[in-house]
Image: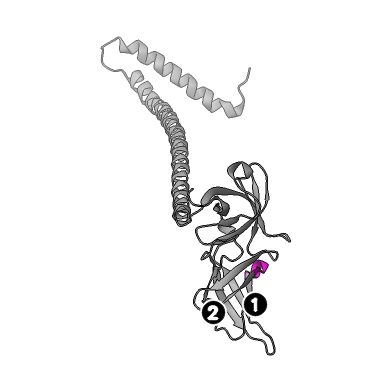
Amino acid sequence: MLIPRKYQSIAVAAVLLIVSLTILSYSAVRLSETGFLRKVVLEMAAPIERAINISLQGLHDVWKRYLFLVGLEEENRQLRRESALREERLNQYREGYLEGMRLRGLLALREGFPYRTVAARVIDSDRSSLFKTLLINKGTSDGLRVGLAVLSAQGVVGRIIETSWHASRVLLMIDENSNIDALIQRSRAQGILQGAGAAGGNLKYISRTEEVLPGDVVLSSGLSGVFPKGLLLGTVTAVSRKEGGLFQKIDVAPAVDFGKLEEVLAVITEAGPGR
């Protein structure tokens, strides 16, 4: 069988290698002086063996690099997993710290009331619809009822309008159906703070003769009995006096950021002293 042309050079090299190795093996046992034929074979075999050794060494190095890279990738994956775990734990610790700070603010507020209070967590909010409300995770089983005031560490949130055994709905003070007896801290002028949705609130029924300035603090007056006296409602942002009108138009920005509420405090006013 004829050998294809493209394999002839390979075949010749293989034959020469086999012949040279055979002669070298035969001659290795004889300690006589190297003959001419053996010298020729040795010259021919040396580069071939060198090429084979270089190829085998190259394959060995490639395999070692492959194993190294596989181990390195696994190590990197492990480091990434550990880093993600540490970041998750750090976030948990951070959330716990921030929650503790918020609860400490509620506790400080709670200490200022001669009434029983119930801390609750906000579990849902609805400020985009017609009614501005939020849902808390405490209800009648915790002593809550319709009409109770709900506060945060920043000020008045609103009042309870619905209750179940373990949940209550709170009407926010910015809802247009919310009306709170209020007074201006500096001048003691009294009026009604009505919710105005995204605009905050409007302080109504303040006489044109009263001096009201932007920056004046607005507090609950306590007249209706729902909200204890002196609770922070907001700050006056704008004042206008229309010609011929009896009252001023007073815009009030609420003290509470309703978009960031997470915990609130319900005040059970009829319980009397103690908590």
Is 195 one of the magenta-colored residues? yes
What is the number of the mark on residue 179? none
Q: Quick check: 106 above or below 14? A: below
Stretch in magenta: 194-200
How far across and down, in percent of the image, does residue 225 sit? 59, 61
**Residue at the right extreme of this rendering:** 130
The residue mark sitting in front, 2 or 1, is 1
Helix or strand or loop: what does disc 2 sit on?
A: loop
Where is the N terminus found, in terms of image quarters?
A: top right
Picture quadrant of residue 252: bottom right
Q: Residue at x 60, y 28 (%)?
A: 5
What is the number of the mark on residue 205? 1
> In the rendered image, which residue does mark 2 sit on?
214
Q: Residues within 10 Å of mark 2 (few under 14, many from 20)?
A: few
Is 62 one of the magenta-colored residues? no
- Label 2 vs label 1: CA separation? 17 Å
How far across and down, in percent of the image, does residue 163 sit? 67, 48
Q: 105 left or right of 165?
A: left
How far across and down, in percent of the image, does residue 269 sit? 56, 54
- The residue lying toward the viewer, choosing from 267 and 61, is 267
Q: 77 left or right of 29?
A: right
Q: Residue at x 53, y 62 (%)?
A: 155
Helix or strand or loop: what does disc 1 sit on?
A: loop
Circle 2/circle 1 CB separation < 8 Å: no
Disc 2 residue type?
Answer: Pro
**Residue at the bottom extreme of this rendering:** 243
- The residue lying toward the viewer, choosing from 21 and 217, is 217
Q: Residues within 10 Å of mark 1 (few under 14, many from 20)?
A: some
Q: Quick check: 91 above or below 187? A: above
How far across and down, in percent of the image, does residue 144 sit? 61, 48
Disc 1 residue type?
Answer: Tyr
